[in-house]
């Protein structure tokens, strides 16, 4: 993961039975996040709970998409696998942490 500009992130995630690598992603005041997700084994599905992020991850392809987290989104959430990928599927989760430097959140936007 790298921050290429203020709030502009590029995140590469490896999916494999039964983990996301890295397991935790911390984004400070994210504006635009470009994800590149690939699988080293079978089909997986990436969903970041409570957000619109939901993408299939096929071996041999890179799933690339841009996410602009709404300003009201902050704190910790899970990234889970939503495509059954084997007997350890339910163990396949990670964490996304969004830190906001603003003093107040209106809850909107
Ligand atoms: Cu899975």
Image (tube, rainbow, N blue to C red):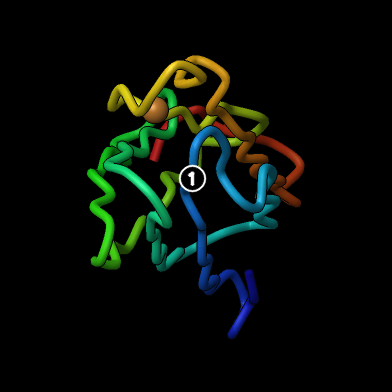
Closer to the camera, 48 or 22? 22
Say which quarter of the image contains residue 6: bottom right
Q: Residue at x 58, y 69 (%)?
A: 7
Left-right relation of 89 to 105:
left
Please rate how many residues cluster around mark 1, counting C-alpha atoms within 10 Å: few if below 14, some from 14 to 19, many from 20. Answer: some
Q: Residue at x 39, y 23 (%)?
A: 86
Left-right relation of 100 to 84:
right
Above-or-below relation of 38 to 3 = above
Q: Secondary structure at mark 1?
A: strand
Above-or-below relation of 2 to 28 = below
Say which quarter of the image contains residue 82: top left
Q: Residue at x 49, y 37 (%)?
A: 17
Q: Which residue is mark 1?
A: 16
Closer to the camera, 1 or 70? 1
Q: Position of residue 81 (x, y in %)?
A: 40, 29
Closer to the camera, 91 or 7? 91
- As drawn, the residue found furthest toward the bottom would be 4
From the image, which quarter does the C terminus lie in? top left
From the image, which quarter does the N terminus lie in? bottom right
Q: Position of residue 13 (x, y in %)?
A: 51, 58
């Amino acid at each position: 993961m790298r921050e290429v500009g203020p709030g502009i992130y590029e995140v590469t995630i490896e999916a494999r039975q039964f983990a996301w690598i890295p397991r935790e992603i911390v984004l400070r005041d994210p504006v635009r996040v470009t994800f590149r997700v690939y699988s080293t084994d079978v089909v997986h599905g990436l969903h970041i709970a409570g957000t619109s992020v939901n993408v299939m991850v096929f071996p041999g392809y890179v799933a690339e998409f841009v996410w602009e987290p709404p300003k009201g989104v902050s704190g910790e959430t899970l990234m889970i696998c939503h495509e059954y990928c084997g007997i350890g599927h339910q163990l396949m989760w990670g964490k996304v942490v969004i830190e906001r430097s603003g003093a107040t959140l209106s809850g909107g936007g």
